Image (cartoon, rainbow, N blue to C red):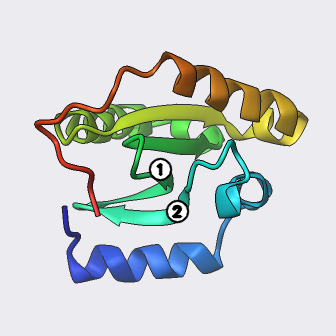
Amino acid sequence: MSAPKTTVANARRLRKEMSKPELNLWRALRRGALDDHKFRRQHPIGPYVLDFFCSALRLAVEVDGYDHCVGSRPRRDLTRDQWLTAMGVRTLRIPAREVMASMDDTLSTIRDLIARLPPPDASHPPPP
């Protein structure tokens, strides 16, 4: 699935402006450091930018700060997650405070989800 030029530009900008929790998690995920699973950071897909994305697993990992809990944001996140699900992408949301509290626990949460994932749906080819 390609992304509009504006989404790609936004992803590039977001890579330069990652939050501290995102930077910490990126250091733990980059270069296949999590059980050889390759993650991309600030990956554009359709109209959205995913914090972290593993194409082989069709898994998005989102680091959610407080702003994801207020106003219209929870509804927007739900709409986004539903769209991603329709595209064959699973989403794991992890609160930023948990990332900052314990990277070991955060990585364990991701590993536990990966272990429970069914094989990717063949009707949905991996997004680019």
Q: Give the residue number, with chain letter if any, for mark 1.
A: 54
**Residue 75 placement: quadrant:** top left
Viewer-closest of 109 and 18: 109
Instruction: Please say if 39 is above or below 85.
Output: below
Left or right for 60, reference 107: left
Left or right for 56, reference 127: right
Q: Give the residue number, with chain letter if any, for mark 2.
A: 40
Expressed as whole percent of the image width and height from the top left, the position of residue 11 reads 44, 73
Contact, CB < 8 Å: mark 2 with mark 1? yes
Residue at point 75%, 62% (across, down)? 23
Q: Which badge, 2 or 1, is on the more N-terminal residue?
A: 2
As helix, strand or loop, the secondary structure at mark 1 comes to strand
Residue at point 37%, 20% (across, down)? 118
Left or right for 32, reference 98: left
Q: How far apart are marks 2 and 1 (CA)?
A: 6 Å
In this view, the residue farthest toward the left is: 123
Rendered image: mark on residue 77:
none
In this view, the residue farthest toward the top is: 116
**Residue 41 placement: quadrant:** bottom right
**Residue 128 placement: quadrant:** bottom left
Label 1 Cα neighbours within 10 Å, binned few <14 / some 14-19 / many ≥20: many
Residue at point 75%, 33% (across, down)? 106
Expressed as whole percent of the image width and height from the top left, the position of residue 43 reads 43, 64
Left or right for 51, reference 73: right
Expressed as whole percent of the image width and height from the top left, the position of residue 18 reads 66, 67
- Type of amino acid at the residue the image marks with label 2: Arg
Instruction: Please say if 120 is above or below 41.
Output: above
In this view, the residue farthest toward the front is: 36
As helix, strand or loop, the secondary structure at mark 2 comes to strand
